Image (cartoon, coloured by chain):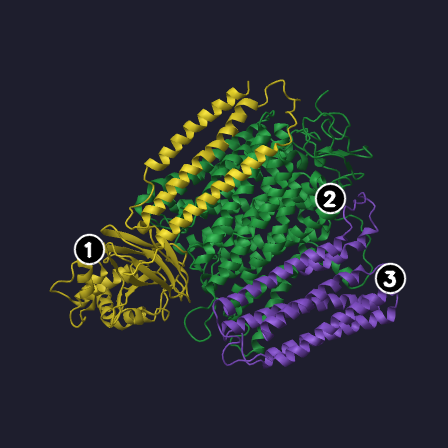
Chain colours: A purple, B green, C yellow
Amino acid sequence: MEAASASSSLHHAGEAAHHGPPEAHRSSRVDPQMLGMLLFIISEIMVFGAFFTAYFFIRVVDGNPWPAEGTELPKAIAGVNTAILLSSSVTLHWALEAIKRGNRPAFKAGMATTFLLGACFLFIQINEYVHVGFAPYDSAQASVFYGLTGLHGAHVALGLLLLLIVTVRAFRGHFSPQAHRGVEVPGIYWHFVDVMWVIVFSTVYLL
Amino acid sequence: MTAKLRAPGWYRSGLFLLLGIAFSWVLVGVGRLAMDYPNAWTDGEAITTVSLIAAPLFFLVGLGCFDYWFYWASGRPTRAEDHSSHGAESWKDYFRVNTDHKVIGIQYICTSFFFMFVGGLIAMLMRAELAQPGMQFVDTATFNGLFSVHAALLIFLFVIPIFAGIANYVLPLMIGAPDMAFPRLNALSFWLLPVAGVMLSASFFAPGGAFASGWTAYAPLSTEMPLGQVFFTVGVQFAGAASIATALNFLVTIITMRAPGMSFFRMPLLVWANFATSLLVVIATPFIAASQFFVLLDRALGFNFFDAFVGAGKDGSVLMYQHVFWFYSHPAVYIMMLPGFGIISEIISVKARKPIFGYRMMAFSLLAIVVLGFTVWAHHMFVSGMHAWIRVPMMITTAIIAVPTGIKIFSWLATMWRGVLRLDTPMLFALGFLTTFTLGGISGVMLAMIPFDIYVSDTYFIVAHIHYVLFGGSMLTIFAGIYYWFPKMTGRMYDERLGKIHFWATFVFFNVTFAPMHLLGLDGMPRRVADYAEQYATLNLLVTIASFMLGLSMLVFLYNMVASWRGGPRAAANPWRALTLEWQVSSPPPIFNFDAVPTVVGGPYEYGVPGAVHGIFQSPAEAKPTTAGSVATSPTRE
Amino acid sequence: MRRHPVAQMVIVGAIASAIGIVIALVIDWFPADAAEQAGPIDTLYDVLMIVSVPVFVLVTTVTLFAVWRFRMRPGQENEDGPPIHGNTRLEVIWTAVPAILLVSLCSYAYAVLVDIEEKHDDQLVVHVTGQQFAWRYRYPQPGGRAIETTALVLPKDRPVLFKVHAEDVIHDFWVPAFRVKIDAVPGITTEVRATPTKLGRYPVVCAELCGLGHAVMRSSVRVVTPAAYDRWLQEQTAPAGGEATGGATAGGEGEAGGGGGADLAALGRETFVSNCGSCHTLADAGTSGAAGPDLTTALRGQDEATLREDIVAPDARITEGYQAGVMPDNFAETLSAEQIDGLVAYLASVSR
């Protein structure tokens, strides 16, 4: 999965150097990297879909209490965490707009802020695991809770890796108003991770 | 030596493999120490589980699958693309990371056939045991392992990837593209495959034997199996990742890289079929990944997804596994069949010298199968104890999905009607496919009928049905496709006489092997058993003998392929006088497929239409148009 | 001109279909039918065959005819067929006709389904529990303790509702002669109905892969007259007391009920055959299971205490080459104290 997301943003780098093969005809206005990322996100949505199926069966079909008796989910902390993650989407968008306008300092600041906000989210999430008071093996509901939030956490980690790459490259002076696909494509992934969190948060914590 | 260890390749991958195992060991040890678990450094099961996940990734890094991306990610200037990883000059080039879709296609095909022979030999062992009632050669644990590995290998390492392999080779050529959209991703998805195959096969060496819960790996049996099960759980993840990445690549290639003039309704049906298949893969495959994540979490970290025994916290849902699993694995049947439909469409049209009958309906029926394919999964669960009401809608959708399938079969028949049929090996396999697949389809409709399914589900009737679909269906289309494109891929002709012997032996012994299984099932013989009642002895002996003959017929194929590739007569660019673009370039095609991207000006199957042309080459310097191809006059009416 | 070969094809097709249908209907492919459910299901099969055979014959005949009539002849190497791209009417027909056919088949199958799953007021409820690798049965008694047995006995002509449970993994309760099956699923209770109509003994099969002993997870069902059923019920409810005969007859008909002997070892042998034999070979008991160690040799010279522990706590000692966790560890609960005493006595007597 890592490879898929990376490659979709990577391929263009080599294109300039093509000397052997004929230039492929572009039969669609959709950008290949963008399309690849969208398809990858569809796959990712389906992975989440399967985990939500587990949630649906254990909570709705089998009618088990949610959360398991004697446990409580820290709604407030998770709410704060949601705000943190959502604001990282805003800063990422800001960074992208900045590089489109050629404002490099704002772009760097935006990327760094986004990365820090994401890392902060992940840190709070791990902290929540430590203090939540139940383990995955305590009950099926706990398994679903850790499964869904853990799956999302793994995606945040992967997204952070992509953001880190972009940030490092930003500080090395890469990207320009003309060439910023390397920001845009990981950006789509990050926005997807954020939207997914809103769904996870509302189903697991709020409902 | 150090230079060898630093450059991408087998030496470095060996080193990295060891590093990966060491890394997993340390990771498990540190983790267990931190959690205060006993014997932190000596828990073999935990170390193996983590190694199975991490070591292959290290191996792939060592092999060089990720080199380019690491360079890019670290922000260093990437090396100029010199196409050094493109094309193959000697056999050694097939054993390294190569970004040429034609090389990758051959790599896929050869790897898949290797695992086909492994899986086939395993089947021979099973049939040997089943020749007589009672236990003779293997014990029940081994037997359960045999049929599980047999199915897993042939599904995940043969049928699914070999279609990806054939399409990898042919599809970019067919749509006039110089390569796939993401060549490096393409290389990576191929190399994930041998990893998965070795893992599944190696499970026999795990303590407690190979995974023995069937290819379905139903929980909670799979969560209680010995260590071998993890080889399946993790191996399938690699195969699934490979399959998703390839499908994504196909979709992007088909959407964005078609030659000018190649509208969707001028695409050959093989391209359509792979488009439909890739949609299924991208949407459905994540579900099997998730189902195996659940099993892995239950096994390795003590999660309770499937722990449903009475007691506190034991509220897992056993049926959930089957829903998630079949939501992938029913579409998987179409993933294993639609590319075959594409191959048959190509062959029947070319060999009957007629346009495909009802081209648009053929394309739409593929899409109809994709959509309906997602609505039928629970027909595998009529006796699973799920809510009874789900069965009826599933029965109806399952029956309805036979309609688009029927459209395809009738259209092929109509395509042959009044044609000029060349009955060579690819066509024979295509015709064999038509009859046996019809039988498989009919037994499928019978199985959709809930009361009948209640009786025969989990019997040999199911075994017969799935083999009529996957052997009589997919396998025969694979052979048809391999013979059909063999001249294009190797530049050599195969031996027609041996090809026909192969066909007749396969066709006859296939039917003798699997047709009696219908009767065994009707008579009440359950599947997945090493031993059976005396009353089934005669038919089982017949099946076993036929299956050995079927196995022998594969040797004819193997010999034909190897000998013809080494020393067959040179093949012309277009021995079949086909119109599609891949036949308009030399055999094998030049390294970058085309010197200039061709322009498509007509449909792909205009046989018999005076003056019909599919593609025009602007600079015909090397890819000289052949009789049937790009000249502006009728290829046949001189 | 062209009419003629098509007519030929129709005739050949009709004859072939007729032959196929006759073969499918005349030969009885099914095992004995012993329940009301068998009739509708077997008829459904017949109807499906009547519909399916002509479809298969159609495809095969057209294929063979095309091969015979339109194959390339010498001199035709460069010839093409006529460029026919399609025929809307034909395409509509072969979309609509199968669709109508399939929907009608579904409606018929639905009617059959309703028929075989019809609820009855006077139904007998039997609880079936699957466990690696044996079946257990429980008959709830009005106002009394439920009867627990390892033998399934059913009265003729009385609708039975099986409530199916699983102890460990998924099993599948299947009586081929009744034509119905249902998975036994851990955590939920599944249901299946059958009304036995013929006296006799029929196999009970586990149809869902459940582990090493799956192939030998067999039992049998005995359909008896209502009077015999009541008698059997009486025997089961009679206090076991010193008389071990009750447990013994539970093992099955035909076995001498222990008669006056009634000693522990006879009960033990009976218990062994119905509870252990599917996994363990033991020459004396005539069993040939292969999932667990061959007890003919493995038990040599063991004392009674060890034997008892081997039964109630099977993972304490594992024979080399076998795995822990395979043999059920709940025999202390599922077998009565007498049965375990009997087993120990019996095994001690054969292992000397």
Q: Residues within 10 Å of mark 2 (few under 14, many from 20)?
A: some
Identify whether A3 is placed above or below B312.
Answer: above
B100 on left or right of B514: right
Q: Residues within 10 Å of mark 3 (few under 14, many from 20)?
A: some
In the rendered structure, find residue C225 and report the number of the disc placed on it.
1
Rendering coords of residue B485 (x, y %): 64, 36
Identify whether B454 is placed above or below A92.
Answer: above
- Residue corresponding to mark 3: A177
What is the chain identity of the residue bearing mark 3? A
Identify whether C96 is placed above or below B420.
Answer: below
Q: Quadrant of the C terminus of chain A?
A: bottom right
- Residue corresponding to mark 2: B87
Marks 3 and 2, how far apart in space? 36 Å
Marks 3 and 1, how far apart in space? 90 Å
Q: Nearer the viewer, mark 3 or mark 2?
A: 3
Indicate the amino acid at tag 1.
Answer: Thr
Q: Are marks 2 and 1 in contact (CB under 8 Å)?
A: no
Q: Residue at x 51, y 68 (%)?
A: A60
- The answer to whether residue B149 shows anywhere in this view is yes
Q: Residue at x 17, y 72 (%)?
A: C241
Rendering coords of residue B562 (x, y %): 60, 36
Q: Secondary structure at mark 1?
A: loop
Marks 2 and 1, how far apart in space? 78 Å
Q: Residue at x 82, y 32 (%)?
A: B621
In the rendered structure, find residue B327 and report the number of the disc placed on it.
none
Q: Name the residue at the left extreme.
A: C260
Indicate the amino acid at tag 2.
Answer: Gly
Indicate the amino acid at tag 3.
Answer: Pro
Q: Are marks 2 and 1 on the same chain?
A: no
What is the chain identity of the residue bearing mark 1? C
